[in-house]
Amino acid sequence: PPRDVFISVRMDVPRGVTRPTVKVDLDRTRLGPGETAKGVIKITPGGTDPKSGGDDNTADDEFKHWGLSLHAGVSIPHPDFSDLRRPGPNFGVDLEYRFNKYFSLEGIYTYHRFGGETFGPFVPGGPTFELDPLNLHQLSVNGKIYAAGTSPVRPFFNLGGGAYFFSPGSTTRGGVNVGGGLQFDVTESMDVEGAYNFHNVFGFSDVKFSTVQGSVRFRF
């Protein structure tokens, strides 16, 4: 008897590669004994618009633009700042918006805490004193450039600037930061990241420090 026919297409897509769309056209779907049909399978790469000629900057429904990250690590003062302060912990949060797979902007808040050095006497046995810890609040905007490729491990470079609030003292200064790191996609909605940044705060010739941080980012 006549039978209905169809074509089934299976695609195995590596992690980090957007799934293509598939369209199947058959000139007839019901065949009798000895009859044949002609089929055309059209595959469109994921994240592209056929009318635009395949521009990779065109996002598809699976691309997640927003990312919320929680980060923590250590802040390390450089000379002459290190003459008065010891390394201390930092932690914060940032919100990222990805324009495409290679460039994003992120707003960052980070709290840095530097310990105070203990000063000894000029004569043995005299009194000593220790500076109070310094609290530094950072509000910055960074541009982030990701390396091209389909690997779940992606190097990146970042550059930005913002305001640095010192406490005690209630002093605010502008500053810049530059750095980079590696990001690893655990799933499509979560990644982990390791980063290094160098900070230079304007208005103080001796306030320069580095940060080494790890983070977990949730994408939506």
Image (cartoon, rainbow, N blue to C red):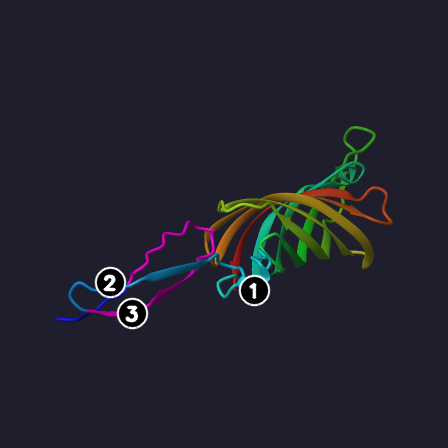
Q: Is residue 74 left or right of residue 6?
A: right
Kindly report which numbered mark, 1 or 2, lies closer to the viewer in this rendering.
Answer: 2
Quarter of the image with the N terminus is bottom left
Q: Residue 154 is drawn in which quadrant?
A: top right
Q: Which span of residues is magenta-colored?
A: 7-31
Q: Which three-letter amino acid code belongs to the residue tagged 3?
A: Arg
Instruction: Quote the CA–CA distance across marks 1 and 3.
Output: 28 Å
Residue topped by disc 1: 51
Q: Quadrant of residue 173?
A: bottom right
Q: What amino acid type should be assigned to the residue bearing mark 1?
A: Lys
Disc 3, SS: loop
Residue in the foreground of this view, choosing between 204 and 114: 204
State the image coordinates of residue 72 (x, y, percent, origin top left): 59, 50
Instruction: Please report whichever mark, 2 or 3, sits nearer to the chain's N-terminal start.
Output: 3
Which mark, residue 36?
Answer: 2
Q: CA distance from mark 1 to mark 2?
A: 33 Å
Q: Can you say whether 219 is above or below 30 in the image?
A: above
Residue at x-position 48% and y-position 50%: 185
Q: Which residue is mark 3?
A: 28
Residue that lies at the very extreme toward the top in this rendered image:
124
Does the magenta-highlighted stretch encompass residue 155? no
Q: Residue furthest left?
A: 1
In the image, is 205 to the left or to the right of 43? right
Residue drawn at (51%, 50%) of the image? 192
Q: Is residue 61 above or below residue 194?
A: below
Q: Earlier in the sequence, mark 1 or mark 2?
A: 2
* Tally of marks: 3
Going by the image, does 112 lie left or right of 10?
right
Asked whether residue 196 appears in the rendered view, the answer is no
Residue drawn 50% across the image and 66% down it: 61
